[in-house]
């Protein structure tokens, strides 16, 4: 690279000689170049296996190679030689899971994440959200969807996150519930009119209000995690549309108060703030509309919780009862 100054001793323009940037590939065929790229990228991973950037660099080099045999050798090399424990082991497993559609490495990633201490709640929820998205995108119906969630340890990870969150005091003392007058509707995410779970949650709020109950809705905006892809070895992320306040105002029933988490803050902060707000509301009942959220665990200890899953599977949250349209489950307690 060459740098050329202009006259008059001042740097009026910095001119880069682009030709000097062209790599010298003389005598190097595509396979040799690809092997060198992958080798150098893997060496970077071995130097800093707990940082996501080298893993992302390895993935970029992998994507640039067309040779199936070279790709397969790289996968075996990573599987055999990269660390398997801790954050490095999680990044290894999540990297490998991104290269295949099977459950094995995703399951390893979930198991590694479950063992890491201290618990990083944003990393945990980034993994949970991404694996939920992958399960939704798969074909195969409810049974395969449920198997994927179970394989990736999502139920256990939600229990773990709930235990961490329950360590925070909930300003909501246990009291007798003689009748239901106030309902806290808790949902992980509210977005816009084209988002079915948003519509479902706000419709439920309207039905409860029509029944004469006082309702307040709380959403910590859990899919919105800053730098989500940096928590995973495969650069995975969920692209979630931020809330459209005009849409929400039009969808929400009259008089409904919405409490939305500030996505600029980490999830743990949002959950603590929401627990405080729910404590001030002092509901008689928690209605959870969603599939999973650690926020339900501390609430379950102090109030009855009714669940309404956004999928045709049991909510991955502690609930006293959950609503379903499946006639085969009508007699189950």
Image (spheres, rainbow, N blue to C red):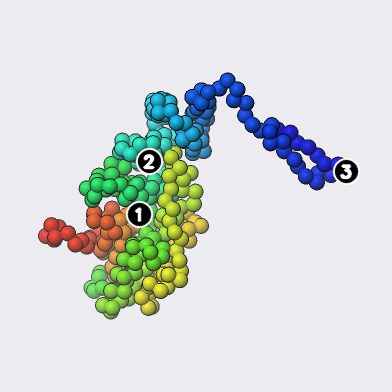
* Label 3: few (<14), some (14–19) or many (≥20) C-alpha neighbours in 10 Å: few
- Label 2 – label 1 distance at C-alpha: 16 Å
Q: Secondary structure at mark 1?
A: loop
Residue 113, which numbered label?
A: 2
Task: Name the residue rendered at 81%, 44% in the picture.
Answer: 11
Question: In what quadrant of the picture does the N terminus appear?
Answer: top right
Mark 2 vs mark 3: which is more N-terminal? 3
Write down the residue under mark 3.
8
Q: CA distance from mark 2 to mark 3?
A: 60 Å
Query: Which residue appears farthest toward the right when viewing the image?
Result: 8
Instruction: Tell me the quarter of the picture where residue 292 sits.
Output: bottom left
Q: What is the C-alpha distance between the residues marked 1 and 3?
A: 65 Å
| Element under disc 3 | loop
- The answer to whether one can see residue 136 in this image is yes
User: x and y percent of residue 108 in the render?
Assistant: 34, 36
Disc ID at residue 294: 1
Query: Which is nearer the N-term, disc 2 or disc 1?
Result: 2
Where is residue 331 shown, x and y percent of the image? 11, 60
Residue 247 in percent (x, y) is at 42, 70
88 shown above or below 268: above
Specify which label sits upstream in the sequence, 1 or 3: 3
Residue 43 in view (yes/no): no
In the rendered image, the residue lying farthest to the left is: 331
Q: Do the residues bearing badges 2 and 1 touch, measured as CB atoms within 8 Å?
A: no
- Quadrant in the picture for the C terminus: bottom left
């Amino acid at each position: 690279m060459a740098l050329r100054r202009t006259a008059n001793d001042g740097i009026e323009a910095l001119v880069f000689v682009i030709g000097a940037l062209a790599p010298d590939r003389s005598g190097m065929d595509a396979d040799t170049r690809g092997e060198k790229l992958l080798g150098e990228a893997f060496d970077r991973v071995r130097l800093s296996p707990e940082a996501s950037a080298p893993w992302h660099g390895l993935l970029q080099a992998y994507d640039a190679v067309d040779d199936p045999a070279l790709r397969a050798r790289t996968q075996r090399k990573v599987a055999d030689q990269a660390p398997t424990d801790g954050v490095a082991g999680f990044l290894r497993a999540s990297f490998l899971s991104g290269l295949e559609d099977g459950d094995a490495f995703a399951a390893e990633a979930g198991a590694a994440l479950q063992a890491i201490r201290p618990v990083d709640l944003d990393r945990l929820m980034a993994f949970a959200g991404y694996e939920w998205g992958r399960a939704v995108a798969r074909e195969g119906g409810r049974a395969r969807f449920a198997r994927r969630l179970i394989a990736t340890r999502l139920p256990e990870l939600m229990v773990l996150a709930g235990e961490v969150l329950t360590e925070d005091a909930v300003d909501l003392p246990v009291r007798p519930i003689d009748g239901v007058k106030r309902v806290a509707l808790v949902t992980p995410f509210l977005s816009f009119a084209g988002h079915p779970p948003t519509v479902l949650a706000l419709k439920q709020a309207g039905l409860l209000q029509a029944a004469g109950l006082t309702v307040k809705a709380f959403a910590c905006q859990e899919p919105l995690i800053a730098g989500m892809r940096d928590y995973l070895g495969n650069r995975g992320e969920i692209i979630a549309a931020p809330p459209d306040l005009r849409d929400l105002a039009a969808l929400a029933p009259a008089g409904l108060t919405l409490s939305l988490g500030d996505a600029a803050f980490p999830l743990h902060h949002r959950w603590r703030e929401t627990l405080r707000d729910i404590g001030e509301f002092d509901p008689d009942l928690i209605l959870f509309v969603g599939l999973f959220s650690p926020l339900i665990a501390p609430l379950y200890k102090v109030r009855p919780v009714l669940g309404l899953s956004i999928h045709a599977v049991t909510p991955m949250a502690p609930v006293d009862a959950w609503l379903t349209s499946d006639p085969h489950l009508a007699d189950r307690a």
